[in-house]
Image (cartoon, helix red, strand yellow):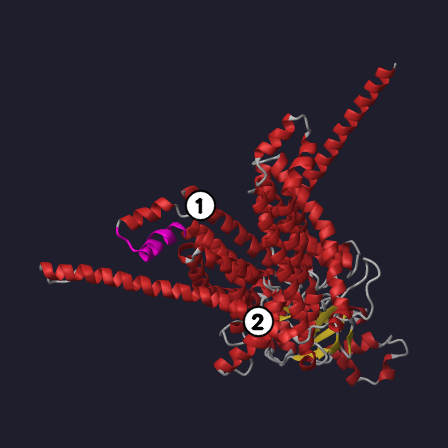
Amino acid sequence: MEQSKENEFSLQLKASGYRLRTRMTQQVAFWTIRLLGFVVVGILVWIQGFIIVNGAGVLSWDFLTQAPTEGMTSGGIFPAIVGTLCLVVGSMVFAFPLGVMAGIYMNEYTKDHWTVRLIRVVTNNLSGIPSIVFGLFGMALFVNTLGFGDSIIAGSLTLGLLVLPIVIRTTEEALKAVPDSYRSGSVALGASKLQTIFRVILPSAFPNIITGLILAIGRVSGETAPILFTAVAYFLPKLPTSIFDQVMALPYHLYVIATSGTDIEASRPIAYGTALVLIIIVLAMNLLASFIRKRVSRKQR
Amino acid sequence: MNTDKQLKFRNTARRGAKWLERGVEGLFTASGWVSIVIVLLITIFLFKEGFGLFQSPTVEKGYVLCVHPSNPVERLNASQIKHIFDYETTSWSEVGGADLEIRPFRFEEIFDYYAEEEFGPDYEFLPDKLAEVVAGDEGILAFLPEQYLPADRSGIKIVEAGNITVTDFFGGREWLPTSTPAPQFGALPLILGTLWVSFFAILIALPLGMGVAIYMSELAGERMRKVLKPAIELLAGIPSVVYGFFGLVVIVPLVQRAFDLPVGETAFAGCLILAIMALPTIITVAEDAMRNTPLAMREASLSLGATQWQTIYRVVIPYASSGISAAIVLGIGRAVGETMAVLMVTGNAAVMPTSLFEPIRTIPATIAAELGEAPAGGAHYQSLFLLGCILFLITLVISVSAELISKKQRQAV
């Protein structure tokens, strides 16, 4: 802009040049940004596609329903699926009611009090704690101090703590979305607070609360670090019979056969298959959650 | 009569309902506080176990280090002991003694000096034989079990090794938790390795994430957003072992070939995987911040003749800057705590990080790899808990600063 020639013509030229330049910059910037967007989608497609293409051939009924054989180089992943199922059910039995009740307390009983703000901050922190730290804690408390040993119950409790913030947060959001007129309407009809919560608020918030449960299930089924020292076994020929038994689990199974199996090359197909099963679980849970969310928002409209 | 009974019944029922209401309310309150209780418990357990390390002796429990009585050396620290037994330190003058060659002596070597039968049927002469060996060599540094020390201590002198200190842990450059006689708990390579990998991961993820965030909040149409939003949610949902597995079979060989390295399991492979894993966090938080820019500000900028791009980088991005910083901080948090993926692709060599193209080891990977082999309650076990404490503190700082940063933005509005 500080060029020396000062006649009108050049000024005009400069102005149009400036306009041209900004246009050009904008075009370049926008295309770069669009490209970055495609890169991110590309990464997702790459990862998912890679696992789906390589794992699809392995997936079969036998793969899902048989135990691993020959040093985990062939056979299926049935015990790992059962183990993960046990851990998911166990952690949800623990975390879901607790999280929902915490959410109710935070939204219905002490709205915007300093205690709630404190709880919210702490819950946020809790969700930021790395999963391996939960593993350490679970080992110290459940496995060693309480003496559960490596077991379904120790793993479930550890995983439950890990997903508690997710359940609390979604419950809180769900309850917030219930209009206040519902509450005052119910109370005006003579219902007690508890009746209002159980008969009016929870039913209308329920679908949204369920999405929290579903997302938590997706998270729990994929976590490895917290169960590493609290629940899983490298290989178990039999299925668990009580909550104090060790189990195999899908994510740990994938880790083991990908890094330290008896014959890594030979067990590669099984690793692909296991990864695919994990991805399918996560995909299904995400789809289910967004499906419920969509249905709810349509109904409320 | 009848009505009286009914009234009584109704009263009891009402009282019962009230009690029930109270009880359930108490239950809700208790659940509400459960997160605080959990965080407190985590803190207590981690720090209790972790700080136990500083009460652990430098030398393995149940063992002592002995020297010849004429040796002036009073104490040795962990790394000195290790270097002596690795034959890297060879003269007493290097550790504050006389100019004399050090002769490191491990307990098992006693069986090379004497025949089995000389110790007696129940090894009752073993302590005396040990004393003999120590007394017979002025330069000796003997690593002996406490139970076999001779009753008469005149011929030997015990060297103080003290407990593991804070400087040993935070300043030590060697992580060899199973080395004998003095395990090395220098966490510096692990701490730096974690920060190193996370830093470069964010460096890679940031431009990508910012680009996508700008695209989603400013440029993308409703249709494109409908594709991108769930895609990013999915990216966040993929389990970390799957990322690790993908890294192991795709990224690692790719890195190895692209940079012509002897091994592909390097810090760089870890950075790439962590960058992908941190993307969803960065994108969601940054996009939220940019979307919050008031329409009036955008319109004012556009009406002054600014192009859309100028509006974005002169108005929207500065306005959202604190949200964007929060995004970066949270992305770092995600990268610092990531365990499985890093464990699978970084090669796990506990060395001081000097280059991106060498194996490296992070704190979470160390915990995951070693906790299974560390006997509960031992120094190794405690050191892993202490690493957990560090991780916990780092993430605490990150959560709190992200909170403060985004609060700043809310106040600025």
Residue B170 x, y percent position in the rendering: 57, 63
When the figure is inspected, residue A39 is found, relative to residue B26, above or below; the finding is below
Give the CA separation, mark 2 to mark 1: 41 Å
Percent x, y of residue B257: 51, 82
How many numbered callouts? 2
Task: Please state the chain letter of the residue tagged with numbered disc 2 in the rendered image.
Answer: A
Residue under label 2, please give it: A49
Residue type, numbered disc 1: Lys
Read off the chain for label 1: B
For residue A24, what is the image quadrant? Answer: bottom left
Q: Nearer the viewer, residue A25 or A155?
A: A25
- Secondary structure beneath label 2: helix
Residue that label 1 marks: B408
> Identity of the amino acid at label 2?
Gly
In the image: residue B411, left or right of residue A3: right
Main secondary structure along the magenta-highlighted residues: helix
Q: Is residue B336 something that shows in the picture? A: no
Label 1: state its secondary structure.
helix
Point 57% across, 34% down: residue: A180
Residue B319 lies within the magenta run: yes
Quarter of the image that includes the N terminus of chain B: top right
Magenta segment: B305-320
Q: Determine the residue located farthest toward the left in the rendered image.
A: A7
Q: Where does the image place residue B162, in percent across and percent down from the top left?
A: 66, 63
* Residue B31 sits in quarter: top right
Q: Is residue B135 magenta?
A: no
